[in-house]
Image (tube, rainbow, N blue to C red):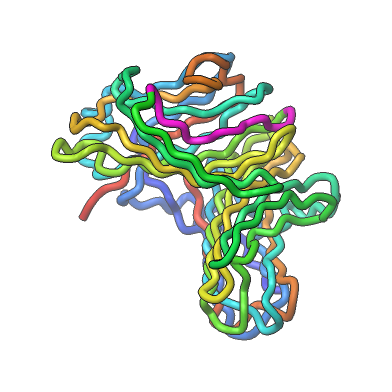
Amino acid sequence: MVTPTYIPLGTITLASTDSEIVFSSIPATYRDLILVFQGGNTGAAANIYQKLNSDATTSNYSSVQMTGTGSSTLSSSPSGGATWTVTFYGYLEQNLNANVIVQLQDYSATDKHKTYLSRSNSASNGLSAIAGRWANTAAVTSISWTVSSGEFRIGSTFSLFGVA
Amino acid sequence: MLLLGVLQAQAAGGVAGSFDLLDEEILLSAQSSVTFSSLDTLAAGYQHLQIRAVAMTTANTRFYMRTNGVTSSSYSWHRLSGNGSGVSSEGNASQSAMRLMSNIWPASSSGAAIVIDILDPFETTKYTTVRALSGSTGSANEVGLFSGAYQNTAAISSVSFGLGNLGPGETNLLTGSRFSLYGIKAA
């Protein structure tokens, strides 16, 4: 059963700054989603926050993250937020030199919580790896990204892929 | 806010390409391991392999991979991982399996997410090397970068995965665990 996959579902390239990017009406056609970002923001060094299905329930998001900054290593497990961060010293900054790849596993399954893996890199600040869980068994139909300072910068790109 | 709706037509628009799903196993009952075999035919024509998995368990355990059914001391691996309070590193040679996650203990109804790249598995002039990104949150938290090698130049004909503290097969993978095998073509 050879099935061609890693299918592009949508790409956004910002022609103007924007505070929030949303991929909506995501079909339950695939096993995994991969979201690829390259860009920056207009404010201070910032994190990207990710929300699924517009769910703002603070107890539903948990994660563990680690980073290397060039001079130290850190790990933490944020809790109590209504989103995940997909960056951790892989910060966005006022250029287009940050990149992030998020893998959302079994996003269309309805019998398990959703887990994600993120790798982010910042030319100036460091790099990170993050694992997270959305404590909800609903299929994921939308993903929103916001930034903790300023807005996403012009020229930032967001690409969503589906993997069967 | 910029909103992009994903059309069903776009989602169905797959074109035969360089990244293909070759096989998949979703567990309908608990079992000790998952194996993809006959890779010489199943993955013929591909340069690299990728495994994307969600490993379900209710135990505090580790995730391992073996190749070609080999259980002797033919593997080495390294990890760089964070557990929420610190970052640590470890490496071991002459192992009976490749460890690709050190501390799985996800919450109920949850699993560990794992993406494994197996590089040049069919080349017979070099050892087969592996890299993985894995993690989960629950009773234990871990995110990790792993590398491994099967210290043998034989082509890979099978890969198997299992849980345990000392090696694979000690702890069952639970119902709902999912393993997908992909082939990546060279130019």
Quarter of the image that includes the N terminus of chain B: bottom right
- Locate the C terminus of chain B by quadrant: bottom left
Indicate whether residue A55 is drawn in magenta.
no
- Image quadrant assignment for residue B40: top left
- B98 within the magenta span: yes
The image shows residue B53 at horizontal and vertical percentages of 51, 35
| Residue A164 shows in this picture | no
Up-down: is A40 above or below A71?
below
| Closest to the observer, B18 or B35 | B35
Provide residue A115's location: percent of width, then percent of height.
64, 42
Residues shaded magenta = B96-108
Residue B122 visible in the picture? yes
Residue B142 vs B35, above or below: the answer is: below
Q: Residue at x 52, y 62 (%)?
A: A36
Q: Residue at x 64, y 79 (%)?
A: A41
Location of residue B72 (image quadrant)? top left
Q: Position of residue A118 (x, y in %)?
A: 58, 54
Along the line of sight, the residue nearer the viewer: B32 or B13: B32
